[in-house]
Each structure stands twice: as structure tokens, then as C-alpha cells.
Image (cartoon, rainbow, N blue to C red):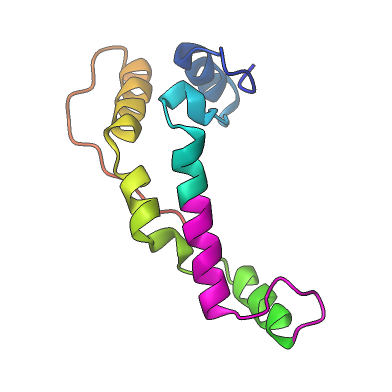
Amino acid sequence: PTSSVSTPLSTCIDSLLDTGFVVIPREVLGFTAEEAATVHRAQLAELDRRFTGWREDGAPVHAEMQKALQGGFLGVQLLPEMLALEFDERVERLARAIFSRIQGRPYDDEVFVWLER
């Protein structure tokens, strides 16, 4: 049910509570395609800067990047464009909605964002 643009947030949270995992479409949170594209372009530009030629399978740097990816961290999620989205009030509203549902009353404590590697 979470793949539809018309899926309400409450349905996404139900799925999260039922299965322990959910993919919430960006549209449900109000993020635009352009906001997502801006972050994607910034991430690709950073990879291009750090790993010149990484997009070519036979390039020596391709193996270097694959090794870095296996380590789980390239640092590209720490870009200003990505942080702007992660610390956006829409993400905080999502956290408050989830926490409120879990505890059965409005959540009014602090919300901390964990930057997952």
C-alpha cells in the first residue's frame, strides 16, 4: 500500500507497526520531485569529484569506489543539500506522527535525526 501517491500517512504508519518496515513515498511527506532531484544531483556531483571516472565499469577508480561502498560510507549524505532535507520540518512531523501512534497520545518531546550510514 505504500507505493501509491494517494496512500495516507496513517496507512504507512500502520504498515510500519505491522511489519517493522515501510517505504513512505516522498509525496506523502510533501517532498517534491525537484527537491529529491537536487539532492541526487549533489550526490552524483560529489561522487564525480571524489571518484573521477567511477561510472565506467572498467575504470580503476570503479573498484576503489566499490570497496568504499562495501564499507557502507562515502560521506555523500553529509552534503548541505541532503542535510537540508533530513532536518526539514516535514521529517520532524513524520517522526512526531510515528511516535504519537506508538505511544497512543501526542508526542511533544524532542526529535533527533540519526544520519544513517
Going by the image, does 111 lie left or right of 76? left
Residue 45 in picture, x, y percent from top left:
52, 66
Residue 61: image x %, image y %? 68, 84
Q: Nearer the viewer, residue 36 or 10?
A: 36
For this view, does 73 lie left or right of residue 54? left
Residue placed furthest toward the right: 58
Residue 46 on the magenta segment: yes
Residue farthest toward the bottom in the current orientation of the protein: 60
Image quadrant for the N terminus?
top right
Q: Is residue 58 magenta?
A: yes
The residue depicted at 65 percent of the width and 70 percent of the height is 70
Number of numbered labels in the structure image: 0
Res 80 visible: yes
The residue sitting at 52% across, 15% down in the picture is 14
- Residue at x-position 48% and y-position 39%: 34
Q: Is residue 40 left or right of residue 91?
A: right
Quarter of the image where one finds residue 19: top right
Which picture quadrant has residue 22?
A: top right
Residue 86 position in % (x across, y down): 36, 45
Q: Is residue 15 above or below residue 95?
A: above
User: Magenta residues, as a range?
Assistant: 39-59
Q: Is residue 117 visible?
A: no
